Image (spheres, rainbow, N blue to C red):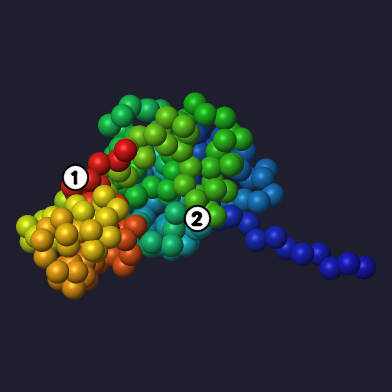
Amino acid sequence: MPETINKIKIRVLLADDHPVVRAGIRSFLSSNDNMEIVGEAEDGREAVSKARELQPDVVFMDTYMPRMNGLEATKVLNQQVPAVKVLMHSVHNSHECVLQIIRSGARGYVLKNGSLEELSQAIERVNQGDTYYNSEVARLALDEHSRNIRRRGRQAASDLSEREAEVLSQIAEGKSNREIAGELGIGVRTIETHRERIMQKLQVHNVAGLIKLAIAHGVAAIE
C-alpha cells in the first residue's frame, strides 16, 4: 500500500476587526487543501502578538483596525518577525492608500471586493516569496520603487567629488577609460583610479551598477 505524503500547508493568520469578514475568509480558506488557519486577530496589536507566538507563513492583514492599524502592525512585524509575510487588504484603492501599503513593507495587496480565488492566488504567491498586486497597484509600486532608487542614488552620489561625478557621467554614456581620459585631458590611469573610488563610494561592483546610479542621480538620461 503506497505511503500517504502529507503536504505542508500554508499557515495563515487572519487579522480583521470585523468578525463576519473573518468568518467568511476563514470558511473559504479552510476549504483549501493548501492552507491552514492558525489564528485570528481583531486589531493590529493582537496581530503582532499572535504572529510572534504562532509564527504563521502569511498574515492576511486588514489595513485599518483599532488600537494599531495594519500599516503600523506590518512595520513592526517586518522588524521583529521578518520571516512572516504580510498580505494586506482594504476597501480603499486610492493612490495614497496604496503607497502607504507599499511603504509599510507588505508583500502584496488585494481589494476587499476582489474574488476569493484571487485571495488564494495572492496568499500562495506571497508565501513563495513573490509580491502580489493587481496591474494598477503594480504600476504604483513600480513608480514608488523608481523614486526610491533615484533617492538612494542622489544620496550616494552626493559623496562624490566634482571630478568623480564628471567621470561617472562619462561612464554612463558608455565611454571607455581612454575616451574619458581624452575628453577630460587627464591620464588613463587616473581615470581607472577615479572609477575604483566611485565604485567604492557607491558600493557597486560593475559598470551596469554605475550606470543605474548615474541615471538615478540625474547625471545620465534614459534614451
Report crowding for label 2: few under 14, some 14 to 19, many 20 or more residues within 10 A (C-alpha): few
Left or right: 32 as drawn, with respect to 221: right
Report crowding for label 1: few under 14, some 14 to 19, many 20 or more residues within 10 A (C-alpha): some
Residue drawn at the location 26% of the way across and 50% of the way down? 173
Check disc 1 and report the residue beneath it.
Answer: 218
Residue drawn at the location 21% of the way across and 66% of the way down? 195
Is 99 located above or below residue 158 in the figure? above
Nearest to viewer (mark 1 / mark 2): 1
Residue 163: x %, y % from top left: 9, 60
Left or right: 12 as drawn, with respect to 49: right
Is 60 located above or below residue 112 in the figure? below
Is 136 located above or below residue 119 in the figure? above
Q: Quadrant of the N terminus?
A: bottom right
Residue 89: x %, y % from top left: 43, 37
Task: Name the residue nearer the viewer: 111 or 131.
Answer: 131
Q: Is residue 66 visible?
A: no
Task: Name the residue nearer the viewer: 58 or 159.
Answer: 159
Residue drawn at the location 23% of the way across and 63% of the way down? 178
Dot 1 lies on which element? loop
Task: Name the residue nearer the viewer: 190 or 223.
Answer: 190
Tell me which label, 1 or 2, sits earlier in the chain: 2
Disc marking residue 129:
2
Residue 28: x %, y % from top left: 62, 38
Disc 1 from disc 2: Cα separation: 32 Å
Q: Quadrant of the C terminus?
A: top left
Instruction: Report the amino acid beneath label 2.
Output: Gly
Residue at the extreme right: 1
Residue drawn at the location 59% of the way across and 55% of the way down? 10
Dot 2 lies on which element? loop
Instruction: Report the amino acid beneath label 1.
Output: Gly
Quarter occupied by residue 101: top left
Task: Name the residue nearer the viewer: 139 or 7.
Answer: 139
